[in-house]
């Protein structure tokens, strides 16, 4: 999995609301059937935070929940719309009707 893929998965996981690292990885696993390694997950979170696409919210104890920023929502929507177009074209070229 590439860095941008991990970032998109993290943004998708946060679309429903703030989560901490373990919960983000659980949401990704429910979506894809695979978990991100700690380096991939926390690396993606660091990159997303530096791009101001996610921000930390007050947490309890060691857990540090993060949430999408308005800019993060815009970026996620744009990325998902692009992915949907690519998937649609790819499936049609394979002779498969998109879902």
Image (cartoon, grey):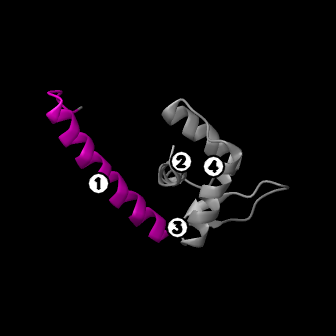
**Range drawn in magenta:** 69-98
- Residue 77 at what x, y percent from top left? 36, 58
- SS under mark 4: helix
**Mark in the foreground, 2 or 1:** 1
- SS under mark 1: helix
Query: Residue 37 — which label?
Result: none
Residue carrying label 1: 82
Calculate the distance from the C-alpha at mark 2 to the C-alpha at mark 1.
18 Å
Query: Residue 13 — which label?
Result: 2
- SS under mark 3: loop
Q: Is residue 63 left or right of residue 94?
A: right
Among numbered discs 4 and 3, the one appearing first in the sequence: 4
**Mark in the foreground, 3 or 1:** 1
Is 36 contained in the magenta span?
no
Among numbered discs 1 and 4, the one appearing first in the sequence: 4
Calculate the distance from the C-alpha at mark 3 to the C-alpha at mark 2.
13 Å
Residue furthest to the right: 61
Quarter of the figure with residue 96: top left
- Residue 90 at what x, y percent from top left? 22, 38
Residue carrying label 3: 53
Residue carrying label 4: 40
Crowding at mark 3 (Cα within 10 Å: few <14, some 14-19, many 20+): many
Crowding at mark 4 (Cα within 10 Å: few <14, some 14-19, many 20+): some
**Mark in the foreground, 2 or 4:** 4
- Residue 79 at what x, y percent from top left? 36, 57
- For the point 53% across and 53% down, which residue is it? 3
């Amino acid at each position: 999995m590439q860095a941008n893929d991990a970032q998109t998965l993290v943004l998708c996981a946060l679309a429903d609301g703030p989560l901490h690292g373990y919960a983000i990885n659980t949401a990704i696993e429910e979506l894809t059937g695979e978990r991100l390694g700690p380096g991939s997950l926390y690396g993606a979170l660091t990159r997303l935070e530096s791009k101001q696409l996610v921000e930390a919210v007050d947490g309890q104890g060691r857990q540090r929940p993060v949430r999408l920023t308005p800019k993060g929502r815009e970026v996620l929507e744009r990325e998902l719309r692009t992915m949907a177009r690519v998937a649609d074209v790819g499936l049609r070229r394979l002779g498969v009707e998109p879902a």
